[in-house]
Amino acid sequence: MVKLALLARLEARPGKEQEVADFLKSALSLAEAEPDTVTWYAWRTGPSTFGIFDTFEAEEGREAHLSGPIAAALMANADRLLSQPPIIEKLTVLATKS
């Protein structure tokens, strides 16, 4: 059962919006390779505002994701692509519908 989640909010630097969108789309294959990441969503809410929402059954999976290749690639490119550091929140899932 999904109990935990991460919510990451990203604000693209001016002129880097398409690169952020492309980065997020390319990260799907990395998320698919993570056995403990139950769901993974990349989203966009405005011209320069993006994010990631993912879910986990246990803390070990969430921590593995935070130290995995998506997080590493995001942090390696953050200064170039983002106008501010990513805001990453650890969430507790209260209810789900499947």
Image (spheres, rainbow, N blue to C red):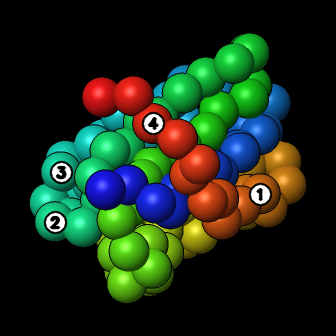
Residue identified by numbered label 3? 32
Mark 2 to mark 3: distance in Å? Answer: 7 Å
Task: Name the N-terminal-most of marks 2 and 1.
Answer: 2
Residue 41, horizontal then vertical, whole percent: 42, 36
User: What amino acid type should be assigned to the residue bearing mark 1?
Assistant: Ile
Residue 25, horizontal then vertical, whole percent: 35, 34
Residue 82, horizontal then vertical, whole percent: 73, 49
Mark 3 to mark 4: distance in Å? Answer: 21 Å
Q: Horizontal placement of 84 versus 82: left or right?
A: right
Residue mark closest to the camera, 2 vs 3: 2
User: What amino acid type should be assigned to the residue bearing mark 3?
Assistant: Glu
Residue identified by numbered label 1? 87
Residue 9 in view of the camera: yes
Mark 1 to mark 4: distance in Å? Answer: 23 Å
Q: Secondary structure at mark 3?
A: helix
Check disc 1: other Cα within 10 Å, few if <14, some if 14-19, many if 20+: few
Label 2 close to label 4 by CB (< 8 Å)? no
Residue at coordinates 59% horizontally, 48% vertically from top-left? 94
Residue mark closest to the camera, 2 vs 1: 2
Name the foreground residue: 4 vs 17: 4
Residue mark closest to the camera, 3 vs 4: 4
User: What amino acid type should be assigned to the residue bearing mark 2?
Assistant: Pro
Determine which quarter of the picture holds residue 46: top right
Mark 2 to mark 1: distance in Å? Answer: 24 Å
Label 1 close to label 3 by CB (< 8 Å)? no
Label 1 close to label 4 by CB (< 8 Å)? no
Residue identified by numbered label 2? 35
